[in-house]
Image (cartoon, rainbow, N blue to C red):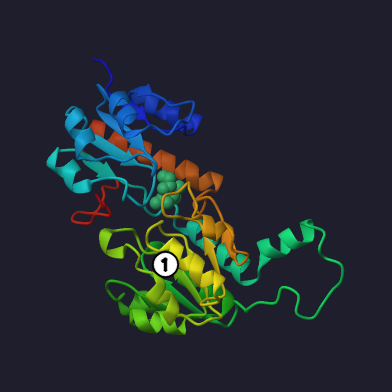
Amino acid sequence: MSKPRVLVARRIFPEVMARLGEHFECVANDADAVFSPAELSQRLAGCWGVLTTGSERIDDALLQANPQLRAVCNMAVGYNNIDVAACRAHDVVCTNTPDVLTETTADFGFALLLATARRITEAEAYLRAGRWDRWSVDMMIGPDVHGSTLGVLGMGRIGQAIAKRGAHGFGMDVIYHNRSRLDAPTESACKARYVSKDQLLMQADHLMIVVPYSPSAHHAIGGAELAQMKPTATLINIARGGVVDDAALAQALQTGVIAAAGLDVFEGEPQVHPELLNCRNVVLTPHIASASRATRLAMATLAADNLVALATTQQALTPVPEGLTGWAA
Ligand code: 8YV
């Protein structure tokens, strides 16, 4: 019997391609091109499944053009690139990669927080530019991280891992806001206190955005929310572009509404708002929070394992949760 055909939409690890090859006829993308919607749709011709990343948009038009498609396995915990409702309507199963990236992403959130608060990239640029000619008492001073108040917006797995690092590693007072309050044992493991969104904005010295993207989270942090924050505060976004209004943030950074920001995700990435590029007080990274080798391998493997499980047992290992969607048409 011939093997089902699977498109692997971006370049992934050879060992994962080898595993897929045991079960599928794989269509690879060795050039690692980011396909336009039309190209993606064409390459899916005859495919039973697809391994996607956040760069591929799976929408109703693409599903209509590829009625043979049964499985969309995303190599990401977020799935706002996929119209999950349309997939259900077309009888296509969607999976994501939760858990395997939690700790690595939380490490990176903390790295970005430390770099932002302690002005690490700004200081390095100053040094490399040959501007360091003497020690001075207030050179590159900034706020402390230890002992300060960490605000976490979005207290899922990654939010909780960040809260634990803050509370247990840095002696921070951790407050959080989430759609629903955590149960008492989880709150106590994270040493985190539930507060309203207003209180979170007003009290946090460092605000960490870890909320998944959804239409209701669009611009959850805009000009009005930034104005509620302390002028000494820092904001870190490792969630998704679009949760923060980047234009409003750039203005807030330029006018001293908040002190600094650290951003790993952007509206319309890989484009970055030009005003952010002009800001001295922002640390910018190209969506690398999950980018440890072990974690990226684990993510690719889990996405592949979902394809194999679906093909062999008709059961996904990590299906996208019922009823949740991050899709904004
Ligand atoms: C991915 C991410 O690297 O998992 C997610 O949701 O944002 C990142 O870890 C990216 O989406 C590529 O798929």
Q: Quadrant of residue 321?
A: bottom left
Q: Which secondary structure lies at badge 1?
A: helix
Q: Position of residue 155 (x, y in %)?
A: 37, 69
Give the vertical position of 64 relative to 231 (above or below).
above
Q: Residue at image x 42%, y 68%?
A: 160
Q: Based on the displayed image, in which of its 4 quarters is residue 8 positioned? A: top left
Residue 219 vs residue 105: left or right? left
Quarter holding the N terminus is: top left
Residue 142 vs residue 35: left or right? right
Image height check: is 91 above or below 175? Answer: above
Q: Which residue is mark 1?
A: 159
Residue 316 location (% of width, % of height): 25, 42
Q: Residue at x 75, y 79 (%)?
A: 138
Residue at position x 45%, y 53% in the image = 101
Task: Relative to 246, say whether 184 is above or below.
Answer: below
| Residue 270 appears in the rendering | yes
The residue lying toward the viewer, choosing from 126 and 48, is: 126
